[in-house]
Image: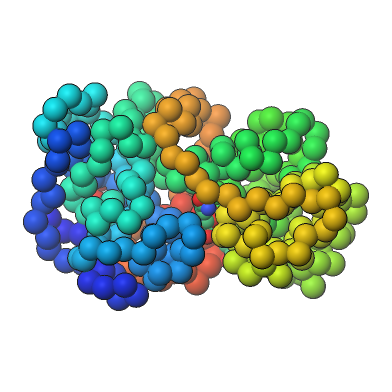
Amino acid sequence: MRAIAVSALRADPVLVELPKPEPRPGEVRVRVEYASLNPLDWQVTDGSAGGLAPAPRTFPFVVGLDYAGRVDMIGGGENRFRVGDPVFGRAAVADACGSYGEYLCVEQDSAITLVPRGLTPRAAAALPSAGMAAAQILEAVALRGHETLLVVGAAGGVGCCLTQLARARDVRVIAAVRGDERSRMGSLGAAASVDLTDGPPADALRRACPDGIDALADLASAAPDAFAAHAAAARPGGVALSTRGAAAGARLPEGVRGVDFRLDPSPVLLDVLAAGAAEGILRVPVDAEVPLADAPLALARNRAGGARGKTVIVLRG
Ligand SMILES: NC(=O)c1ccc[n+]([C@@H]2O[C@H](COP(=O)([O-])OP(=O)(O)OC[C@H]3O[C@@H](n4cnc5c(N)ncnc54)[C@H](OP(=O)(O)O)[C@@H]3O)[C@@H](O)[C@H]2O)c1
């Protein structure tokens, strides 16, 4: 099968030909139709995922987590899936069997579920990591209606989902982005957008949040100092959450609780999100669609920044 893999930690991802993986007892093999790109894909192979994911140990290591396709083979034992089922999900991090490959083996009780009627496999593939992270971030910051959430890095995959899910709960979202994204973020439900390149970021945030915020979800800052600068907008009693492991080392304002978020993938949460997406309540914008051979370029582009929604990789459209 064709796959994008690395031959060692920090090696460049390249298109290779590999044997099809064989499902073990309790696993299913999925013939992948679409994968989607997450920054964790390159952070893992770079060894820069920090405490969020272990570095790969088995090579060649097939890149990628999120996928949609059809069950093509069942491993031994009881299984809740059947050959031919349309499925989507998120593979385990640091499993050598990634989603940027034509076939993928995953445990049947991992974060995998049926694609519901009304959801295309392309849209399903874009959903798992970004959608589940957004839903669990919203739980972690525990805001009530009319409270204010500042989302830094709001224009990417997680941010687009988080903005919509928060808005659906009447939370007031301030989207902090680089560039003028007022129209895009407004259409997803943001009450206001701040361009962090419009003068010093701290000044731009002070102007956008003169009364402070109830919670921060910082999806961009890897450095504790940058995270702490954004958390300065939080009121006492507020929460400052990082998806990049920046909270533990940050000096936060008095009374502000720091959280280093860690996704806990689950098939039940995938079902809830897929139902919302099938009904049109949750829209996952697709920024780019590329063939498998161009996935290494897409990874390099994502590493450089500038994501506006998700990149989808086509394996068998
Ligand atoms: N902890 C967990 O379990 C977990 C779960 C999901 C995601 N994550 C992490 O969360 C991060 C975001 O994920 P994602 O899927 O949303 O990534 P993404 O789709 O690549 O989006 C990242 C967004 O951040 C923006 N950005 C980058 N640097 C910025 C800065 N200094 N200030 C403001 N915006 C900035 C980018 O646009 P510009 O470059 O144009 O600003 C882009 O829109 C990734 O590092 C990912 O690994 C962690």
> Residue at (19%, 51%) from the top-left corner?
102
Q: What is the quadrant of the C terminus in the image?
A: top left
Q: Quadrant of residue 63?
A: bottom left
> Residue at (40%, 55%) from the top-left corner?
37
Q: What is the quadrant of the N terminus in the image?
A: bottom left
Say whether residue 285 is left or right of residue 190: left
> Residue at (26%, 69%) from the top-left corner?
6
Say whether residue 271 is left or right of residue 105: right
For the question of whether residue 293 can be seen, the reply is: no
Quarter of the render that holds ligand 1: bottom right
Residue at the extreme left: 19
- State the scheme by which the image is colored: rainbow
Q: How many marks?
A: 0
Q: Is residue 191 above or below residue 108?
A: below
Front one among 194 and 183 = 194
Percent across and percent down for residue 41 are 39, 60
> Residue at (26%, 73%) from the top-left corner?
8
Front one among 262 and 134 = 262
Q: Is residue 261 above or below residue 48?
A: above
Q: Is residue 273 above or below residue 244?
A: above
